[in-house]
Amino acid sequence: MVRRAAGRAGGPGRAGGPVKGARRPEVRLPPLEPHEGSALEPDGDYDGLEFRERDFAGQDGGGARFMDCALTGCALDETRLHHARVLDSVLTGVRGVGTDLAESALRDVELVDARLGGVQLHGSVLERVLIRGGKIDYLNLRRARLKDVVFEGCVLVEPDFGGARLERVEFVDCVVKGADLTAATLVDVDLRRAAELDVARGVDRMAGAVISPAQLLDLAPVLAAALGVRVLGEVGEI
């Protein structure tokens, strides 16, 4: 069961208007039963279950539905969850490389202290999702749709938002290294509280985002390069 919190309005956004804050999920799980099965099943239906310290490496749960579930300390190396639906659930301390969640749907989900690499979420839909703590390397969100998503206190290394649509997305106290925004669409994206912000590609797609004055100075070199502006010293200056 989920109760949804209203987002906060921030400072001025596009055209001087207020920034629409993301609505965070507030997941309240019912009493859970431990999952007794030995493996995930394609198109499996998991409702009100707790998965604790399970090793799902290499398993196929494509098309599965997880509702009112808790996954704690589970291994997801090369786990296939293509077209999965994760609803009203909490994932804590999950870890793995190459987890395939392509074209999945995540709604009212909390992902806490994850350690993931090469996660495939391209073409997925994320709505009211909180990603808090942990580190995710090479997160693939190409052509995904993110609405009311908060990245908080986490480290994102080379996240790929190519062709994605981000609406009411916040980055809070997190480190973003080498982000790719190529062909992305941003609406009410608040980057001001990111602890570190590095955009490797697609800086020209940042219309619709809000940054701080300090971040503007940090991004000046890539903004100048995107505009084809050369920055030189005064004539005769060494």
Image (cartoon, rainbow, N blue to C red):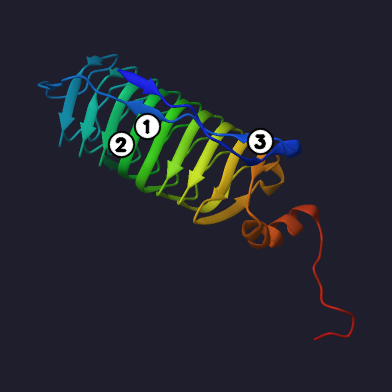
Q: Quadrant of residue 54?
A: top left
Say which residue label 1 marks: 100
Pick the front one: 139 or 18? 18
Which image quarter is the N terminus in?
Answer: top left
Query: Could you say whether the residue bearing mark 1 is in a helix, strand or loop?
Result: loop
Residue 78 marker: 2
Quick one: label 1, few (<14), some, or many (20+) residues within 10 Å?
A: many
Which image quarter is the C terminus in?
Answer: bottom right
> Which residue is found at the position 58% from the left and 42% from the top?
190
The kind of residue tagged 2 is: Glu
The kind of residue tagged 1 is: Asp
Q: CA distance from mark 2 to mark 1?
A: 7 Å
Circle 3 or circle 2, nearest the eye: 3
The answer to whether any part of residue 198 appears in the image is: yes
Q: Locate residue 190 relative to residue 26 in the image: left or right.
A: right
The kind of residue tagged 3 is: Pro
The answer to whether any part of residue 86 appears in the image is: no
> Which residue is found at the position 49% from the left and 56% from the top?
195
Q: CA distance from mark 3 to mark 2?
A: 42 Å
Q: Disc 2 vs disc 1: Cβ atoms closer than 8 Å?
A: yes
Query: Could you say whether the residue bearing mark 2 is in a helix, strand or loop?
Result: loop
Q: Earlier in the sequence, mark 3 or mark 1?
A: 3
Q: What x and y, as percent, mark residue 119?
A: 39, 38
Pick the front one: 79 or 93? 93
Q: Earlier in the sequence, mark 2 or mark 1?
A: 2
Q: Is residue 108 above or below residue 44?
A: below
Residue 18 marker: 3
> Which residue is found at the position 23% from the left and 28% from the top?
70
